[in-house]
Amino acid sequence: MPQETPQLVPLTPGAQRVLDAASRLFYERGIHTVGVDTIAAAAGVTKKTLYDRFGSKEALVVSYLQHRDARWRDHVAAHLARVPEPGVDRVLAVFDAAITWSGENSPKGCSAINARAEIDGGDDERLVLAEASRQKTWLLSVFHELLAEAGFDHPDRRAEAMMLLYEGAIVTVGMGTFNGPFLVARDCARTLLEPASPQDRAAPSAR
């Protein structure tokens, strides 16, 4: 699969408590509204322990995003493993993964998008911005690889179309505009891909 997941350093029990508390609070309340005092109290550790384990709040935010992303990548990989043959259904497996992931794990939308919306790219937040961008670049590359291995022409442009459908759906999840946005996105993706699939183009027309 494109782009390796960043190597996650094993955490001590105290660091894991900090990360668990921070992950819950960052996702539920937002990054800027949650201070290190609140995180330390929720984790049952001192601020010194938090800084000893992570160094800064920025590094803690990056760790939060990376650990969520690692879980999401594993989830996508499991769905792709169920559809090993290249083709439309394997591309759609990414949307299937999102359908089963979003309700429980992303009721407020995408953590990377939410983090990006909060930061202005200042020096103290550049690593967070880079991590959010990396996650989106990875997903785009997944779509590109799946489309290329299936033999679609212009896989780069088709991957961009799939990405737009995915991103629109995850934002709609967070906004709660309507129910089942990933089901709609999946149907749209199928509509876009099936007429252009190499198998369809190769099939003889009925006469």
Image (cartoon, rainbow, N blue to C red):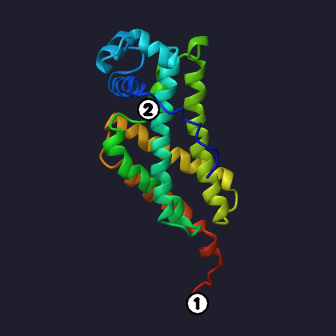
Separation (CA) of disc 2 from disc 1: 51 Å
Residue name at image x 59 percent, y 32 percent: 133
Q: Which residue is mark 2?
A: 111
Q: Is residue 147 left or right of residue 53?
A: right
At numbered mark 2, what does the secondary structure look like: helix, strand or loop? helix
Amino acid type, label 1:
Arg
- Sort mark 2 into few (<14), some (14-19) or many (20+) by Cα contacts within 10 Å: many
Residue name at image x 47 percent, y 13 percent: 51
Q: Position of residue 16 (x, y in %)?
A: 40, 28
Mark 2 vs mark 1, foreground winner is 2
Q: Position of residue 92 (x, y in %)?
A: 49, 59
Indicate which disc residue 130 carries: none
Q: Which residue is mark 1?
A: 207
- Sort mark 1 into few (<14), some (14-19) or many (20+) by Cα contacts within 10 Å: few
Q: Position of residue 174 (x, y in %)?
A: 36, 35
Amino acid type, label 2:
Ser
